[in-house]
Amino acid sequence: MSENSMFLLFLFIGYAVVWIGIVGYMLYVAARLRAVERDLDSLRGMREENPDEPRDSASSDG
Amino acid sequence: MLAGGSRSIWGLTAATFIAMSAAIYMIFMYAPMERVQGNIQRLFYAHMSMAWIAYLSFFMVFVGGAIYLARRSAKWDRIARSAATIGVVFTTLVLITGCLWGTRVWGACWTWDARLTTTLILWFIYVGYLMLRGYIQEPQSRRRLAAIVGIAGFVVVPINFLSVYWWRTLHPAPTVLRADGPTLPPPMLATLLVTVFAFTLLYVLLMRHQMALERLIDEVDDMQFQLLLTERKL
């Protein structure tokens, strides 16, 4: 393989890594979002079954 | 695909797509081939833009942590946490693209050069920051401690930037942010600026999605913590 072809191969691998990394991260965020939404729904269900529980949130949005 | 369907999100997504397409066109079609390094030099445009995003992210971790400590606002903690996650993703990509470039140009993927070593230290600091958050259950203590680590960790960012001036390194010196002005030829400089702009738009977009996720995680954490308190009372 010529020197220029090797440079092009490394360039291709480099940009492939960049885009796989960014798209992979976006897919991870989307998957986490769905999982957290499911958790939130089940917790809301548990809270409705437990009306004695305190309702004030620990976080403040300031 | 991701959170939020508002007009501003779609506008930002479209702007990012257009800017990124322009950047890719300029990198491969417009920018001339560098005489010594050949085509592998085209990796530099993404490498440098991602390094900028990593710096910006760690600066946001610093700012978010400092404002959280001053105001105790969960929103600023979420900003810091989101920025740290994105910063780690981009620092990882910077290290990988640097390794690929180094393999062809230096003949080595890695060298214990000051710039490379401090970049690896940065990566460890912010991975540690994210891991630390996972170990502390109580939300207030977690946010406070993470803010302190995020502020202290930022000290390495200026050291990383200035390392090429302070020590003799293999890593090339900056070609744009110089006292005597940029040394890049105008087509290369234009390509770099468009790429940096495109990655900055991508960063804003990713921050918005990551923030939406972190808001839901906070809600889940608070509800779990309250349920735990209720169970202990019973």
Image: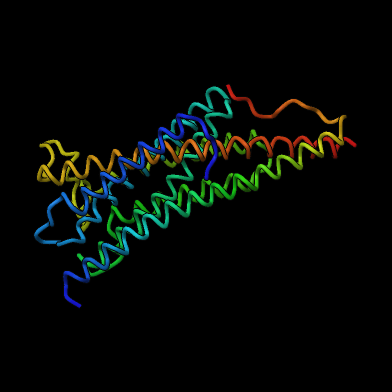
From the top left corner, tell me how far across and down residue B143 is, in percent. Answer: 59, 35
| Residue at the (30%, 40%) spot, across then down | B19
Q: Nearer the viewer, residue A45 or B85?
A: A45
Q: Nearer the viewer, residue B72 or B92?
A: B92
From the top left corner, tell me how far across and down residue B155 is, in percent. Answer: 38, 40
**Which quarter of the rendered picture does the C terminus of chain B lie within?**
top right
From the top left corner, tell me how far across and down residue B62 is, in percent. Answer: 44, 34
| Residue at the (30%, 46%) spot, across then down | B21
Q: With B219 as the anchor, is B72 left or right in this view?
A: left
Query: What is the image's colouring?
Result: rainbow
Q: Residue furthest bottom?
A: A1
Q: Is residue B226 above or below residue B174?
A: above
Q: With B173 as the anchor, is B46 left or right in this view?
A: right
| Residue at the (46%, 38%) spot, across then down | B207
Q: Is residue B28 above or below residue B76?
A: below
Quadrant of res B53: top left
Q: Nearer the viewer, residue B225 or A41?
A: A41
From the top left corner, tell me how far across and down residue B146 is, in percent. Answer: 54, 39
Q: With B223 as the anchor, is B56 left or right in this view?
A: left
Quadrant of res B204: top left
Q: With A37 as the anchor, is B185 left or right in this view?
A: left
Q: Is residue B109 above or below residue B136?
A: below
Q: Residue furthest right?
A: B234
| Residue at the (34%, 53%) spot, across then down | B94
Q: Is residue B104 above or below residue B151?
A: below
